Image (spheres, coloured by chain):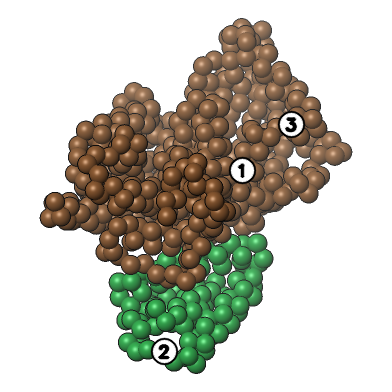
Amino acid sequence: MVPYAGSRVKKTFRLSMIWLHTWIGLLPGWLLYAIFLTGTASYFRPEITTWMQPEAQARAASAPAAMRLALDTLAQAAPDAQDWYIELPEARKPGLGIAWYSPGIKDGYHTRTLDAAGLSPQVRDTKGGEFFYRFHFQLQLPYPWGRWLACFAAVFMMTALITGVIAHRRFFKDFFTFRPGKAAGRSWLDFHNLAGVLALPFYLMIGYTALVMFLYMFAPWGRLATEPPAPKEAATAQESKKPYDSAVAGKPAAMVLAPLEPMLAEAEKLWGAGEVGRIGISDRKDSSVSISFDPIHGKAISIDSRKRLEFNGILGTHPEAASDEGKKGSASRLNDFLYGLHLAHFADPILRWLFFCMGLLGSAMVATGLILWIAKRRAQKENEPAAGPGFYLVERLNIAVIAGFPLAFGAFFWSNRLLPAAFTGRSDWEVNLVFIVWGIAFLHAFLRPAAKAWKEQLALAAVLYLLLPALDAITAGRFLAQAWRLGNSAHLGFNATAAVVGLFFAYAARRASKAITYAEKVR
Amino acid sequence: MKHTLPVLITAALTFLALGMERHHLPALGRKPSRNFRNGSKSAGWILLAFAIPVAVAAYGWPVGAVTLFAWLAVTGFALTLCLSYAPRFAPVCTVCMAVLMALISFWN
């Protein structure tokens, strides 16, 4: 049977499905692996941010006090900004965040995290978990190219899943079966089937909801036909052509706002104390200034289960709702439900860990699939002297992505602890270092013999992750002790997880070096 | 309710696995009789069916379904690793899960 012979093989349905699964799985495989891993990390977005900003963790101020501090700081730091945002501390994210937005200037959106005294250089500037979240669907590429790539990755993923079920149809007979140490790709195939089948409902859910979330990109016509362009967007588009200063010059300073405390009290009464997540003050320069309160996500799945609370910024009253506003159609409600299912903000800690594990299983499914492609061809090509350029490319890309990408993540966390807090542009440099290290991993993967490259990159990743808790204790020991005292499970859990990840890579590196000795014996 | 769900699912999957000839022998050390295999499989399916109302009672329909699938995937993976590397421990997986869940509920 030669299922890989391309166009010759269209004989049966199943063979063509195998062919499709092989190539549809291979092409976006590296991309899917990166998306799977960053998405998995994004389940713990606030926890990662908490670890990466250890200075901001000791906060137990009440919501009104936090809001007052944020407003005072914003008035000092960004008196001219059009919009202000406040991220109140919550259980999963103890830092108090502020953000401001000035349209019409490059990089007009700024975020900062405050400590007890307000804006302070003591709190290191970092993208934190946000980096993983953004990478997951934008791939660190300029808008909209990253989203388009992620969009196509989702389409390919659904195709690979469905063809995969047909290609690997024997999995019910082999259920609960993993045979380690078997030759010629048998073990990889076992693991690929195992990871693929066990969490199949999860992958289908993630792939399908991702397609729904991207629907506005690859099928925008329904929306364009029914929704007129929002007038506010048109206005900002015009405004953004003018330089920002002249737009401000002719207008009076910020409007006198109605007091925010009663509004906050109303929001807390509605949702409960500590349930207010984000406060927005938009169009501050205008008489149309409005103030909004968004709740943190509740226990329901839909992202729209709790409605935003809005106020007129000058009068302090609720705006009159348009008659059809707030009444969503069933399609729209389904969209909110599927969106919420993908984001999993509703999950309690146990379910969040389960999602995390299934995300890792998904990454392993993609990785073993990619390795399997090589293993099968190596078994076939044993008697041939040299492998072709395609084989070489896939083999090396596998190393640079499967081992190199987590390695570059490790560099992200290390740079967070090693770059000084006062370093200018440090949050950008943390990200730059990820790509510098990843670039080196690519070079290394293409220049070294494959088996050695595997071993070295896996070993380096093991060292980075295993030593991360030690690095944390050395460079941020004060905060680690504080986290221990306060029972900050995010900070401690991050270190524990890093150690487990490091152990896994150490095991993988050991297996890779065993594979080298095996290959040398055979030769 | 929340914490009994994973114990039920582990038990169900273990019974299903022990009902398969391939896993029965290394786990229990003897060849299974046809009756044992059928009984074990039935027990597994019944426990699995019973897990559905438990999940719904603990979380409600939507989150309950999600949680049920999530536990199936993760305990299934753990059980498979156990069957490959230490098959003798497979029958006590359920006990381990019960202890773990008792600890977690105690912690909370």
SS at circle 1:
helix
Marks 3 and 2 belong to one chain: no
| Mark 1 crowdedness (10 Å alpha carbons): few <14, some 14-19, many ≥20 | many
Q: Chain of mark 2?
A: B
The amino acid on which the numbered mark 3 sits, given as a three-letter code, is Trp
Cα gap from disc 1 to disc 3, whole angstroms: 15 Å
Marks 1 and 3 belong to one chain: yes
The answer to which of A254 and A217 lies nearer the viewer is: A217
The amino acid on which the numbered mark 1 sits, given as a three-letter code, is Leu
| Mark 2 crowdedness (10 Å alpha carbons): few <14, some 14-19, many ≥20 | some
Which numbered dot is residue B32? Answer: 2
Q: Chain of mark 1?
A: A
The answer to which of A370 and A203 lies nearer the viewer is: A370
Q: Is residue A416 above or below residue A249?
A: below
Left or right: residue A135 versus residue A239 is left
- Residue drawn at the location 64% of the way across and 70% of the way down: B56
Cα gap from disc 3 to disc 2, whole angstroms: 60 Å
